Image (tube, coloured by chain):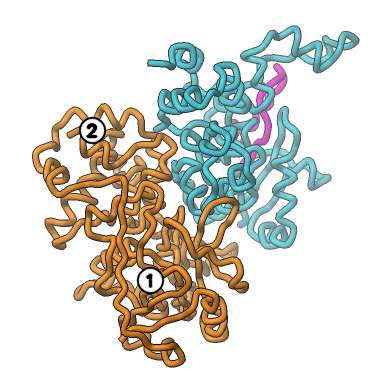
Amino acid sequence: MNYRLSKQKIGDFLASLMNEYEVIAPVNDNSLIKFKQISNTDKIILDFGNSRYSLKKYFLPNKQVLFKYTKEDIQEELDNKKRIIFGIKPCDVHALLIMDKLLLGEDLEDIYYKTKRNNTIIFALANNKPGENEFSSSLGTDKLERGYDLLFFDKGDYYIIKSGSEKARGFTNNLEQTEEEPQAELNCEKSLSEEQISKLKTSFDSPVWKEESEKCFSCAGCTTTCPTCGCFDVRDDPNLDLESGSRIRIDASCQLKNYTGVAGGHVFREGRDSRFKHRYYHKLDYFKDQYGKHMCVGCGRCITNCPAKIDMTEIINKL
Amino acid sequence: MKPRVAIFDLTSCDGCQVEILNLEDHLLDILGKIDLVNFRIGKEVKEPGPYDIAIVEGSVSKEEEIEKIKKIRDDSKILIALGTCATHGGLQSNIHFMDENEVKKAAYNDKHPQQTRDIKAEPLSKYVKVDYSIRGCPIDKWDFVKVLKQLLIGKLPKEDNNPVCVECRFNENVCQFEEKGKCLGPMTHGGCNAVCPSNNQPCDGCRGPLEDLNLKAGIRIMKENGVSDEEILKMVRKYTGVDELYNKIEELVKNGNN
C-alpha cells in the first residue's frame, strides 16, 4: 500500500511536523541548493538535481563538541534534537548506509553519530533529475530498497509515497492510500562501470596518478563535500581557567599533508600523488574488498566542488 | 607566578593589537592569567624585560627597528609574531616589487623624505628567531586566545596547515574560483574561518602560502579563467610576496601556460 499527496499540500504536510521536529529541506541559498532548517515551507525547492554540499553535517558535523570536562567531571554532549530531512536523494541515503557500516559497527559504535541517526527521520525523494556531475545510475545507487522512512516519487502534480519503516507509520495516518506503484528512472550523463573500476587492481603504479595529481591543490574540496568521507581529528580546547574545557572532533582529510603525520615528524603520504591516489583506492577499491560495496555513491560532488575541475570518472578512464 | 607578557609593535597599523582589545569581555580572564607588563595601546606603564612571552606586531621597516627586535628577542624566552606584517612584511612589503623612490614619494611627499632611515619592510624572521606566528591581516582574536592558552599550559602551539578551502567548505560557500575566477584560498593558510570567501570575496592570501601549495595549478587555472599576469602577481604580492615559497612566481606566471 502506498500513499498519495498533492504537491500543493507538501508545504502543509511538512509544516504540521514542525512542532515536534526540526525540518530540514533543500533551499536556494546564494544561488546554491543547500539543505537547511526551514521555518517557511514556501522556500523549499522541489525540483532539483542535488545539493551542492552533502548532508553529513546532520550526522557527522565538521566540528563537534564530544564532551565538556572539568577537573572532577565530564559531561557528554549528545544531540537529541529530533529532525526530519525532506528531499534527500537516493545516492545520499546510500551514503548514510555506508557511514552506518563504519560508525554503527557491531564492535565499534559511535554514540554521537548513532544518536543523531536515531533521531533523524529520512524523507527521501526518488530520483528523476541527476545532480551536477552525478554518476550514481552506473553504480546502482540511484535507487532505494531501504534506508528511508518515507520515499517520495514526483508524479508531476502529486507525490506517490512509499513507507519504509515502522517509524513512518505516524506520518502516513492522514494520507490518502493508493495502489499506484511508482517508478523513477535516472539517466546520468557521467558513468563509471565496474569494468572501468576494476582497472584499479592493476594500476597502483600507473604514471596517471603523478600526472593528474599535478593539477590538484590538495585543498580537500573533494573530501569535505563527499557524503562518505568521515575522517576526523580529536583535540582538546581548554577554557581560559586552564582546568576545564571541551573535547572536540573536527573533519580531517587524507588529501592534506598533515593527515598522515606521526610523532617524530614522519609523514607517510608526503607526496601529493600518493594522497591523490589514496582517495580513488579507498572509495573504489579497498572499501569494497572489506565491506562488499563501493564507498563512492556517485553523487558527483567531488567533481563539482573541485577548484581544479578534476573529474573522478575521467581519471579512472585514463588508467 | 604569572608569566610576564609584553606586546610590542614595529611598523604596522596596530589593527592586530586592536583585535586583542576587542576581546573585551574576556580581557579580565586573560589578565588573570598573565602579567601584562608592556602594551602600548592598552597600558600606560611599561616595564623593562626580561619577558616570558613577547608578542610583536609589525614589520621591520626602519633601521632602528632591527635593533629593537633584536633587543626584544634577547629579552624574551618566547617570541610570537602577531599578524601579517610581522609574519610576512604585510602590505608595506610591496616595496620589494615596486620602484622605491616612487613609493617614498607617495608615502612622504617631497618635503621630508629623510626623516626615517627606512629599509625595505621585512618579516621579523629575517632578523630574529620567531617561535610561533599568529597569521592574518588582521589576526583572528580567537587565534590569539588559542595560542595564549597553549603557551600557558606549557605547550608551543601547533598549526593545522590546512588551506582556507577547508573552512570555506565547512561554511558551504560559493567557490570564488567559480564566482570570480580567482582565489588564493587553495594555496593559503586557513584558520581565518574563510572570512573573505564567506563574504563573497576571493582570498587574497594574507595568512601566507602553505608549504604544500600547488602554485603551478593556481596560476594555470587563474590564467584559464582570464585573470591577467599582472593581476595574479598583484594578488600574490599584496601581503606575503616576500615569502620564499613565492620566489619563482614571476617566472611561473610568465611561463604558466605549459
Residue A32 in percent (x, y) is at 53, 52
The residue pinned by badge 1 equals: A153
Residue B72, magenta (yes or no): yes
Residue B114 in the image: state x and y as whole percent: 83, 10
Tell me, what hue is chain B?
cyan
Left or right side of B122 for B253: left
Q: Which numbered tag is attached to residue A52?
A: none
Q: What residue sits 14% from the left and 37% below the top?
A: A204
Q: Position of residue B22 (x, y in %)?
A: 74, 52
Helix, strand or loop status at disc 1:
strand
Q: Is residue A47 above or below residue B7?
A: below
Give the magenta part as a residue range.
B54-76
Closer to us: A103 or A10 = A10
Residue B176 lies in what quarter of the image?
top right
Q: Which residue is mark 2?
A: A209
Q: Which chain letter matches label 2?
A: A
Residue B77 seen by the camera: no
Q: Colour of chain A?
A: orange
Of B175 and B157, nearer the camera is: B175
Q: Image quarter for residue A217? A: top left
